[in-house]
Image (cartoon, grey):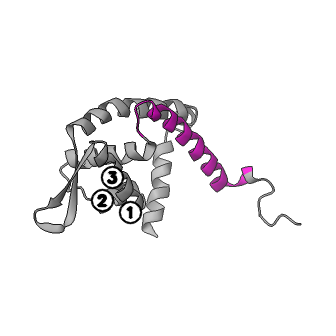
């Protein structure tokens, strides 16, 4: 059988490499967060909820999904888990009974204070080799996200 890709080797594919790098980074984060009984997705949604709440935004599951770029069904499932753990409160919007408002609990905010330095230190360790060589690394990532939004 003949190889049909334009790449002679998968390591020539930016998409495949990004997939592998993402998996390695997520394994590292997952390992560190497991020590405090959080998954990576739980951390992202809890921290995003707190960030939006602190910045005066109305936080709904839809807003959280849009902000984190996660699937709405996944957000719904994980928010229920975070509620069961006592980290997020879900309340009906008094102005629109169909809408559920989210906010971190005190316990959730305390968990973020523990988790955030863990994730930030893990990120710094993981990305240090590239950020030393590419000081505009985050700007490049943002340009990829902006290109997606502009399409």
Q: Secondary structure at mark 1?
A: helix
Identity of the residue drawn at 77% across and 63% down: 6
Q: Is residue 36 magenta?
A: yes
Q: CA distance from mark 1 to mark 2?
A: 7 Å
Residue 38 in the figure: left or right of residue 101: right
Residue 79 numbered mark, or none: 3
Residue 20 in the figure: left or right of residue 65: right
Where residue 25 sits: x, y (%)? 55, 40
* Residue contact at pointers 3 and 2, CB within 8 angstroms: yes
Considering the whole magenta stretch, tell me its main secondary structure: helix
Q: Secondary structure at mark 2?
A: helix
Identity of the residue drawn at 32% across and 46% down: 82
Please name whichever residue, 123 or 59, is drawn nearer the observer in this view of the structure: 59
- Find disc 1 in the rendering and name its residue: 72
* Residue contact at pointers 1 and 2, CB within 8 angstroms: yes
- Find disc 2 in the rendering and name its residue: 61
Where residue 52 sits: x, y (%)? 25, 49
């Amino acid at each position: 059988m003949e190889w049909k890709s334009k790449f002679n080797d998968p390591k020539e594919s930016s998409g495949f490499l990004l997939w592998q790098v993402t998996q390695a980074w997520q394994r590292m984060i997952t390992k560190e967060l497991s020590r405090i009984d959080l998954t990576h997705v739980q951390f992202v949604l809890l921290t995003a909820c707190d960030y939006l709440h602190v910045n005066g935004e109305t936080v709904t599951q839809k807003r959280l999904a849009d902000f984190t770029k996660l699937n709405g069904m996944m957000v719904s499932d994980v928010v229920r888990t975070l509620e069961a753990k006592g980290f997020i409160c879900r309340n009906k919007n008094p102005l629109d009974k169909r809408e559920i408002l989210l906010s971190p609990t005190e316990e959730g905010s305390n968990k973020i204070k523990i988790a955030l330095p863990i994730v930030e230190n893990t990120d710094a360790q993981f990305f240090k080799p590239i950020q030393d060589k590419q000081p505009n690394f985050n700007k490049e990532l943002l340009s990829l996200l902006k290109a997606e939004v502009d399409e």
